[in-house]
Amino acid sequence: VFALDHTPPLEVDYLPSELHVGGIDPKYEYRMTWTEIQQAGNVSGQFLMYDLSVCGVQLNPNVSSWPAVVDTSSACLTLPKEMFDVVKTWAPLTCHGNGECFLGAGRFPRLPHLTFKLSDQGSILQMDLSDLLLEVDNVTSLRNDREWDKARKLCMVEGPSVLDRNGNMQNPLFPIQIGIRALRHLYVVYDVNRARIGMSSKLSDGSPTNVQCKEKVPCQGMQSYVSSANACEDPKCHEYFLLQLNDATKTCEFEPGFHAIAVIFVLMFVVIEFSLNYVHEELSKRVHNALVPIEEERDAKDAPPSRQGLEMTMLSQPSVEVNSNVELRPSVAAPGAPALEGVAL
């Protein structure tokens, strides 16, 4: 086990930096946050940083963690291009095209803190970006209230982009490289036997992390806010039919010809509606006229015969006259002959 306690020269009571071998400083021992050390290709000592943010804004909102490595051979903090852009957007810096950023002359030499965690549920750790301000005229102390009359360069390097030409995330990811100056407010411990790294913040939990952060840009109308760029994005009105952007109100409005086109469409629908109603009525009449004779014939067949028709039927049948002098007698059969039934005269 060995630990790095890098104190800035002349920062606090002229304390020197220290390397602790075989143990941990007791004042940090119970405040440590640990994570596993990973081996990624040729990069050793790599670990994951979670929820990396500045001024409350995620440096990369698309992923929750990012690989990082402590680089004691470097003095500065190296960030991927997209993360570098977020920091220079929110910190009060003036940056040039070559990637160099400066704190302007006359500005109070304090910058926001870079906050992160070593695990998803771990405690919040802080890196003070003010530690990255290079000294001017051999004056190194940052803890004072006087203004500086010269611009100070920030020891922060812009790394390569994490996106390819198609805008997709590259793999493997370029790791964040934490140089010596960025460790001034962090106590770092390496546990070689357990293959883990631990950190403890030298800043108290109540330390302000948003010192001199830029103000949030207000949006208007239908604009959407992009926190990583601290800018407002206009609505994409052109993606919708007959809509255009009103630059004054930042809202989507109908194009001038929309009302004329709308009237034409309404008239078309009215004409189509009346035409369909007319066709429906004509078809209904024709179907009704075609069904009337069939229904009348069916009703005639199903109706019961009338009284007059019944009398006519009876009159049309032949009548049988019965003589009152005819006497009905039982038939008498001769012996050996069949009996004959009928009317005896």
Image (cartoon, grey):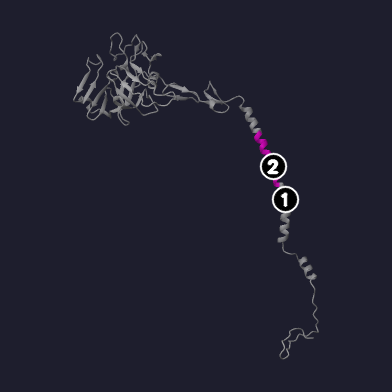
Question: Residue 249's x, y, as percent?
Answer: 52, 22
What type is the residue that disc 1 sits on?
A: Ala
Q: Is residue 73 above or below residue 121?
A: above
Q: Nearer the viewer, residue 4 or 122?
A: 4
Which of the pair 319/176 is nearer the observer?
176
Considering depth in this image, is 92 or 327 the residue closer to the camera?
327
Q: Quadrant of residue 257?
A: top right
Return the residue at label 2.
Answer: 279
**Which residue is situated farthest in the front direction here?**
42
**Residue 37, quarter of picture:** top left
> For the point 78% across and 68% down, which residue is it?
313
**Is 66 one of the magenta-colored residues?**
no
Is any atom of residue 206 visible in this view? no
Residue farthest to the bottom? 335
Which image quarter holds the C terminus? bottom right
Q: Quadrant of the N terminus?
A: top left
Circle 1 — which element?
helix
Is residue 115 positioned above or below 284 on the image? Answer: above
Q: Is residue 113 visible?
A: yes
Rendered image: mark on residue 49? none
Residue 110, x across and y down, in percent: 33, 16
SS category of the residue bearing label 2? helix
Query: Hey, what amino acid is under mark 2?
Result: Val
Residue 290, disc: 1
Magenta stretch in the rendered image: 268-284
Badge 1 local density, few (<14 within 10 Å), some, or many (20+)? few
Label 1 with label 2: CB-CB less than 8 Å: no
Examine the residues drawn in magenta and state their main secondary structure: helix
